[in-house]
Amino acid sequence: MNDSWQCAQSLSAEQRLEVLNLLNRTEAALGREAMDEGRRRIVVHGWLAEDWLKYRDGVLEKYALLTLSKYATIEMCGGGFDPELLEQVLKKHPVVDWWTRDSHDKCDGEVIRTLQLLRLKLPVPVVEVPEGAVLRNFESGRDEMTWLAQNNAAFADHPEQGEWLPADLNERTREPWFDPSGFLLLEIDGQLAASCWTKVHELHPDRFGEIYVISVDPKFQGRNLGRVMVTQGLASLRRKGVNDAVLFVDESNIGARKLYESLGFRVEREDKLYRFTRS
């Protein structure tokens, strides 16, 4: 017998383990992440969110996590779409944004955003830092507020990366995967001009690298610093024995896409955000 979707405002310890096991099994089956990193971290740390669970014969079969900002935003484990769940969620929220990841499920909502996952074989030619500039590693306890100001200025109009708080940065720098040697800062005339934060997916069978966050302060744009920092970040990954690198870019960001394509990045998949409104 199939049970219907259940909504929980928090997960019990047993439910968290069930969800994490489901995420891990799904990732093993798909060969990619089962859910956005930020939402997975909510489960790992037991933070409050709106959790949706569906059991079959007492075993957790499906899971979705919903967060609230301007609109309710939801993603299912595996990145698919479920019309039954949508019907239930729309009873609680008048507008629902639904992320699909590399999904072929039929979805009739309005596409409001597309993220492209790009992949590149390493190595690539490295662009040297400008004369007089200083390239160094991020230092905890010294660089937090300066980096947040630079990053938030660069992403002022970005829905996820433009409003980072100290807590957001601190949480990530305490994650097991954090390595300051892969977090590069570029200073020009004593100011933080650009940065490139990389990540190595050590537990993935292919052990690939990722350009996690890259940004150039608006005051320093137009100086080819984006290319400098991307190639320096890729060189950092290569020195750690990484053969492949990935990054996410908004399809609408034409300038960034042209830069990445010129370096050899190619589209591996597209993730789409659909909007649904209660009728």
Image: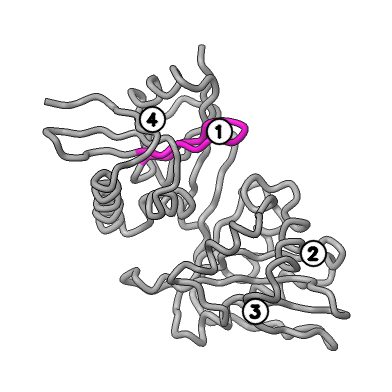
Q: For the point 84% across and 88% down, which residue is it? A: 131
Residue 225 place in picture, x, y as percent: 76, 72
In this rendering, the answer to whether 52 lies above or below 25 is above
In this rendering, the answer to whether 14 lies above or below 6 is below
Q: Earlier in the sequence, mark 1 or mark 3?
A: 1
Which quadrant of the figure has residue 75?
top left
Q: Which residue is mark 2?
A: 217
Q: Which mark is residue 106?
A: 4
Secondary structure, mark 3, is loop
Left/right placement of residue 270 relative to residue 229 reads: left
Q: Is residue 26 magenta?
A: no
Residue 66 place in picture, x, y as percent: 45, 36
Q: Amino acid at mark 1?
A: Val
Q: Earlier in the sequence, mark 1 or mark 2?
A: 1
- The local crowd at label 4, few if under 14, some if 14 to 19, many if 20 or more residues have their Cα within 10 Å, is few
Left/right placement of residue 79 relative to residue 135 reads: left
Estimate the spatial distance between the alpha carbons at disc 1 and disc 3, rounded to whole Å. Answer: 40 Å
Q: For the point 84% across and 66% down, which residue is it? A: 222
> Magenta segment range?
64-76
Q: Earlier in the sequence, mark 4 or mark 2?
A: 4
Residue 107 place in picture, x, y as percent: 43, 29
Q: Is residue 69 magenta?
A: yes
